[in-house]
Amino acid sequence: MQNTISFELNNKKYVSKPFDFEAFCLVNEEHINSPDGKNASIYRVCAPAVDYMFEGTEATQDIIDSLAPAQRAKLAIGVWEMYAAEIKNV
C-alpha cells in the first residue's frame, strides 16, 4: 500500500505522489532544525513535504497555496502520521 495524501477542491480530487524517502527527509530536516525546538508545529514541519508530494501532479503550487489553512493542516497531519510510522519502523 502506498501512502498518499489527497484533498478535494471544486468537486475535483487531487492525490499526491506516494510518501517516499525524500518526503521523509524533508520532514526530518525541518523537525531536527526547528528553531523553536520541540514546540514546532506539525504544519510548519510538514509544509515542505506537502508541497513536494504534490510536485508533478495536477495540483499546482497555486492550487496548494489557495487551500484553506484547515485543509493544509489536514494534509500536514497526514504527512506527519506517515513520518511517525516510518520512525517507528527504524
Image: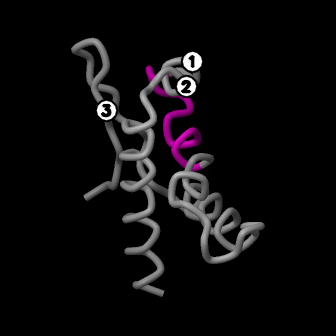
Dot 1: what SS? helix
Q: Nearer the viewer, residue 6 or 74?
A: 74
Q: Is residue 56 on the magenta stretch?
A: yes
Looking at the image, which residue is at 31% across and 55% down? 2
Report if the CB atoms under discs 1 and 2 are less than 8 Å apart. yes
Q: Is residue 36 left or right of residue 77?
A: right
Distance between mark 3 and mark 2 Cα atoms: 13 Å
Farthest top residue in view: 10
Looking at the image, which residue is at 37% across and 65% down? 81
Count of numbered labels shown in the rendering = 3
Task: Report the magenta residues as a range.
Answer: 49-59
Distance between mark 3 and mark 1 Cα atoms: 14 Å
Ranked by sequence position, the earlier of labels 3 and 1 is: 3
Task: Sort mark 1 into few (<14), some (14-19) or many (20+) by Cα contacts within 10 Å.
Answer: few
Dot 2: what SS? helix
Q: Which residue is mark 3?
A: 7
